[in-house]
Image: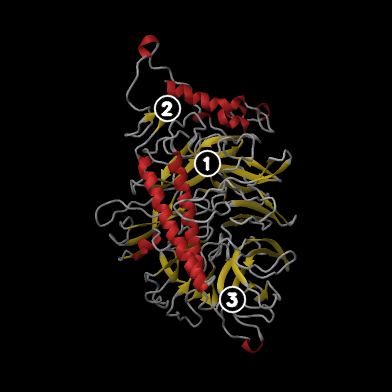
Amino acid sequence: MRRFAVLLAVLCLPAALAAGPAGAAECPNAALRVGPSAVLPGCRAYEMVSPVEKSDGNVSSTMSVHAAPSGNAVSFGSTASFAGSPASPLGGTYIARRGSNWATEAVDPPQFNHSGLLIRGTPVSSPDLRFSFGVSSMALTPGAQEGGSNLYLRDNATGSRTLLAATSGTLLALETSGAGGGSFLGASADWSHVLIGSREALPVSPSEPAPAAGQENLYDLTGGTAHLVNVLPGETVDPAGAHIGANNTPYRHLISEDGSRTYFQVGGFGAGPLYLREDDTTTTPISVSQNGAEAGQEKPAEFGVATPDGSIVYFTSFSELIEGAGSNALYRYDVPAEELTAVIASPPAGEAGVRGVLGASRDGSYVYFTSGAALAEGATPASGGVNFYVSHDGTIKWIAQSEPASTEYSFPQQWSVSPDGKVFGVASESALTAEDVLSPACPTDPYLNNQPEHCIDTYAYEYDANQLKCVSCKWGVGPTGISEWLPGRGFSELGGQGTRESGMGDEFPHAALDNGTVFFDTPNSLSSRDVNGVGDVYAWREGTSELVSTGRGEQPSTFGDSTPDGSDVFFLTKQQLVKQDTDESTDVYDDRELGGLASQWPPEAEPPCKGEGCRGASSSPPAGLPQGAATVAGKTAPRSCTAIRAKAKKASRQARQLGKRARRSAKRNGADAQSRRLHRKATTARKRAHRIHQKAATCGRKG
């Protein structure tokens, strides 16, 4: 009873605070804007998305949250099996749908390994969450192979499954489950075409050539049949197989929305030409030289990004395909016009070319990329760092340059391009603007033995204003007594870009929107309501950073995903923001315009007893705590804290080892493909170690 009373007091505390720009009386959902929702602006209110009962587990913070455009459906992962999941008791993948309350269902296919233990992959869902793609060793439909690798498409409206492909071996299942990076590469808008890459030779039509033996091949799974994609002109297959291109660029669109166009390369990185297979036909490659004596020759290339309809593609090539483009230039190919152009017309002689393609707008008119060369006004040659650029209608604009001491020599830490191409969100360990001041409070990890480095900050670039702003930096009154930019205090992340798992195709959380919003997580207090000193979720728009989470919990909150218009913002938190949330587990919440659900604010229960009979202490843990938890000074101290601290040390050791490998590789080979891959792995491992250390530091405390 006492715990319930304290919970109500915590929930009702923010109601006494001043409301945001839209007062409670002005909102049609005023009756539901209670508790922590009372201070939200714009008639917004919190809703609990994940279920109350989670079998003593949490919503996973290492798997991406994926929101449907309507905001009425969300997918997420877990650290325990619940909601009737037939897969592993150690986790699962779920879809929650909004009605009178949010209802959750599991989408993992049931599966067993040879020991009889449950195992799981990571199902990937369509953008509207209508379909989910997963793997099982169990024969769940006619034609599937028991004990083999069976790829299924689940219709989430009916729960029925369709077999996409089946093999007797286990390689395809391991690839699809994430070992080796995941096989899912993309799908058409209606998911009638699913694109995968695999070293397993899938059975194809007798009229098609056989896949390259023992090599990576690309397959279009449609109509219950696997169709080989990497077929060359003349209906032949390169024995080196296919190359799928870099997998860290959001929304690459290897396959078009209607499924008619698919891009592929042959061989490994930079080994072979770039091809387009359209309507089951491959003609000449796209990367054909137009330069002098080499005109007409097929040249190696690296796929960058394509528009959703596949009509425009950006790629790089070490060969000078157009005279004056230079080495490793960025090219644009217009498919309907059959026109190849160089984005960089005449780079300075002797300077490095393009190092990475970051993204493009839906119509292909904007493209963001990195280069070591000085290609626009304000830029200087990047020695050890890299310049960030955007090109639009033949004009290149310089955005910023990373510091030589950073490891960002090809890509920033995280990035996201809005669909219209006018907003670019980026996270960097370099100080990209003058307002970003190195903080003496920036933590270093004693387990990594690293030198003090700048904490990661987040930035928003607006094309029309041609301005880059540090959105996680804090403006306030400094030691001098005057207003100034104050140093940041910890690692900030571009919303959702640091938690994406491999094998998820090119779908990324929506961190940069067409309306100018950029979402990010930061421990910096950018609002007077942010008083907890740990990570919170913010939305930057129109020059100001606005809290999405409460800024009051002892545990950090993190961004999950947003609808394209920003009307729903999903985030993860351990705070209890509605009355029905009575545990201390991580949950998914929706910060929703005109939101709030009456079902999540049930009437207060009658007290079980009155008077003297209610007195007396109990040695049992409070209701809702897991078995084995103890209470110390009013706080929980689960036995798992020791395990979390051990896990944190192990994660730090792994990050340190990967960092050493990346530095050695970069020293020996420069910014080659392997060095970049090692760098990305080291960065991911370091951030993972930091997150686990944060959990270890706060383990046992209420959030």
Disc marking residue 633 = none
Callout 1 amino acid: Ser
Q: Residue pushed farthest top?
A: 612
Residue 101 position within the rendered picture, expressed as x and y whole percent measured from the top left: 49, 35
Of 672 and 369, nearer the camera is: 672
Q: Is residue 164 visible?
A: no
Q: Is residue 681 left or right of residue 27?
A: left
Nearest to N terminus: mark 2 or mark 1: 1
Residue found farthest to the bottom: 293
Q: Which residue is mark 3?
A: 317
In the image: residue 314, left or right of residue 600: right
For the residues labelled 3 and 1, the Cα–Cα distance comes to 42 Å
Residue 92 sits above or below residue 345 on the image: above
Separation of marks 2 and 3 at Cα, in angstroms = 62 Å
What element does badge 1 sit on?
Answer: loop
* Badge number at residue 557: 1
* Quarter of the picture holding the N terminus: top left
Q: Amino acid at mark 2?
A: Gly
- Badge 2: residue crowd in 10 Å (few <14, some 14–19, many ≥20): few
Displayed quadrant of residue 655: bottom left
As rendered, which of 344 and 257 lies closer to the eye?
344
Query: Compared to 49, does 362 lie above or below?
Result: below
Secondary structure, mark 2, is loop
Image depth: mark 2 or mark 1 in front? 2
- From the image, tell me which residue sits under label 2: 634
Tag nearer the camera, 2 or 3 = 2
Return the disc, 2 or 3, that comes first in the chain's sequence: 3
| Image location (x, y in percent) of residue 349 | 69, 78
Q: Tell me the crowding category of disc 1: few under 14, some 14 to 19, or many 20 or more residues within 10 angstroms, Cα based.
A: many
Please tell me how many numbered marks the rendered image carries: 3
Q: Are marks 2 and 3 in contact (CB under 8 Å)?
A: no
